[in-house]
Image (cartoon, grey):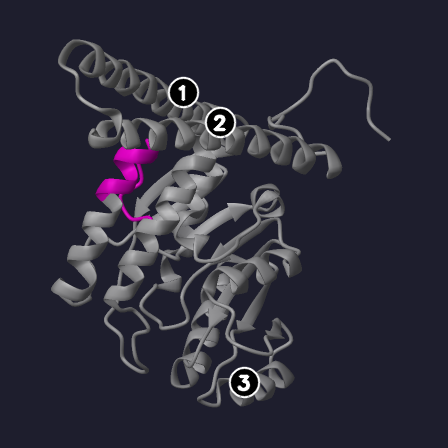
Amino acid sequence: MDVSVVLPIYNERDNLIPLLDEIAAVLGRMGKRFEIIAVDDGSRDGSDEVLRQAVAERAYLKVIFFRRNAGQSAAFDAGFQAASGALVVTMDADRQNDPGDIPLLVAKLDEGFDLVTGWRKNRKDGLLLRKVPSRIANFIIRKLTGAEIHDLGCSLKIYRKQVTDELRLYGEMHRFIAVLADGMGARVGEVVVNHRPRVAGHSKYGLLRTFKVMLDMTTIWFMRRYQTKPIYVFGGLGVLMVLVGFGLSAFVLYEKIGEGTWVHRNPLFLIAVTCFLMGVQSIGTGILAELIVRAHFESQEKTAYAIAARAGFPPQA
């Protein structure tokens, strides 16, 4: 199989058949052997019925049905595990991503990249609810992670199978796939793609997602910088709090000796004790996190590094 297309679907009944036929037409013209893996994420609008009928009529279509709505990240993950193509393409099922951009993504990938993501430079979405929050979130994420990607929320991407094999998505992490892949050492590229207005169905986006993105971004920042050394964060904070506690205690002692201020009348003493206890607790948390990290890597025989290639070694069996 040359190309696997992964489609997460949630309540997109009226968009499915036109989109499936459009993808098939594009890949057919490219002369690629392909499959489309549609992942129905617990739809309630009859999308599952449309897919059951479509899979009986289209040999290239494979469908995974979730028992309940699990989110787009889970749908991507299920599609990645089922994909058999050397290249994996992802896109939204709302028909705003243009399948006609797939050849452009493939051409960019052939320049030596492992993942190429689309950039919806001219988005056909609402300004206040979609564009402005997205631009703010993308700017903050670029600054915190160092990943120079303009449009992290674009689902139109192409991957080499080696990348999707290593990715494990949880929660709402699909928005940070490019950042995760970059952290794995993958070469990430970007191309401007066409973005079309929605012609059927309803958007699932709301301002609540912006807050979710901010929380997930904190997780990504921590994993990217301190996944294998959490003691640097918790231990550093702990040492700082302990030093503040000792400093305040010394000042309280100075006030008692020099000015006669009684300890039980000095709120700084309680603050000093609190800082000291928080510091000890933070250091303890860092030690526990270090033990958990080691158990995670060693129990699954994982490493904290990724090997891109080998040379000079005998062939592996």
Q: Residues within 10 Å of mark 3 (few under 14, many from 20)?
A: many
- 279 vs 203: above or below: above
In primary-sequence order, the first of circles 3 and 2 is 3
Q: Pointer 3 and pointer 2: residues touching (CB < 8 Å)?
A: no
> In this view of the protein, which residue sits in the foreground, 265 or 303?
265
Identified at 26% across, 31% down, the residue is 264
Q: Secondary structure at mark 1?
A: helix
Q: Secondary structure at mark 2?
A: helix
Identified at 35% across, 21% down, the residue is 240
First to last magenta residue range:
139-152
- 314 vs 8: above or below: above
Residue 48's tag is: 3
Residue 283's tag is: 2
**How far is the residue under mark 3 from the one under mark 2?**
50 Å
**How far is the residue under mark 1 from the one under mark 3?**
55 Å
Residue 239's tag is: 1
Please state, as top left, top right, bottom left or bottom right, where the C terminus lies in the image: top right
